[in-house]
Image (cartoon, rainbow, N blue to C red):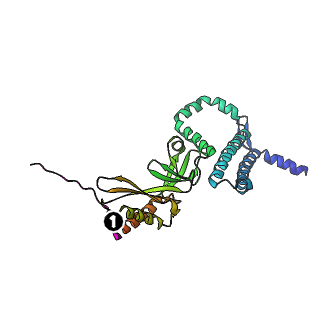
Amino acid sequence: MDNFLQYLEDFLGYELLHIGDYVFSVGTLLTLVLIFFSTKALLWIIKKALYNARSLKSMDEGSLWSVFQIIRYLLWVISISIMLETVGVKVTVLLAGSAALLVGVGMGLQQTFNDIICGFILLAEGSVKIGDILEIGDDIIMIQKIGLRTSIGINRDNIVDIIPNSLITTSRLVNWSHQSKKVRFRIRVGVAYGSDVELVIRLLKESALEHPDVTNEALIDVWFTDFGDSALQFELLFFSQKLFRIERIKSDIRKTINKKFVEHGVQIPFPQRDVHIKK
């Protein structure tokens, strides 16, 4: 037994790297490997616990992902600090000694640090979560991942967008998924003067009702909005849960409207102008 312990001590103390007073041994290497895999194992256990805990079943997947990401980043920061201490690097001394360098790097990477801070804000605040549908500028994005510096989403053309976190936190945007999975949409249409208004309203309601992705018949409405230059202006309002593919739904409803208008003799006029030429 004593021989085995002596052999183990010699093995762990075997020098792999020796620079000045610094010695990197097999024991140090094994300690680093142990810390690394212990961190990964602990993260796996935490993730399983979060998704299986009865008390958290009321939370959606996006919120659970945000909580796990915050824990993951903090745990890795602690683990890396312990690893540095293990190899003999004093983290506090390193940070103090490199303060001036960090200031210079910070000035050059100001936007990157801004995105990282915004990433923590997104994860902690929960205003944007995985699966949310955002209207950013003229594009509609479904968020698939919220990272430390950037978030990844996919638009309605199935193109992946990599979005800096600062753009999400500092810009005005619309979160279609924030309060309700059911959103009201509008289709505008004009008909010729002299058309039967009640008939037009009935045909518009029927066109929306016939689509399978339109919800709640009682909430379908038609407004007679204005007397236009060339047409009577109407607006069809309906609710749908298919937020990400709403343009396809609108296209289907427009085709149904056009078909019904043709069948009932309702005309959609085009702008006309009279030009008078003086001789």
- The front one of 86 and 183 is 183
Where residue 244 sits in the image (x, y, percent)? 50, 58
Q: Residue at x 44, y 66 (%)?
A: 206
- Name the residue beneath numbered marker 1: 266
Our reading of the magenta stretch's main secondary structure is: loop
Residue extending farthest to the left is 279
Residue 104 in which image quadrant: top right
Q: In the rendered view, tell whether residue 14 sits above or below residue 215.
A: above
- The front one of 150 and 223 is 223
Where residue 85 sits in the image (x, y, percent)? 72, 38
Where residue 106 sits in the image (x, y, percent)? 56, 34
Q: Residue at x 71, y 56 (%)?
A: 48
**For residue 110: magenta?**
no
Q: Is residue 257 visible?
A: yes
Residue extending farthest to the bottom is 263
Q: Is residue 269 left or right of residue 162?
A: left
Residue 118 in which image quadrant: top right
Q: Is residue 53 visible?
A: no
Residue extending farthest to the right is 1
What is the secondary structure assignment of the residue under circle 1? loop
Report the magenta residues as a range: 262-275
The amino acid marked with disc number 1 is: Val
State the count of labels: 1
Q: Is residue 54 left or right of residue 238?
A: right
Q: Is residue 74 left or right of residue 278?
A: right
Q: Residues within 10 Å of mark 1 (few under 14, many from 20)?
A: many
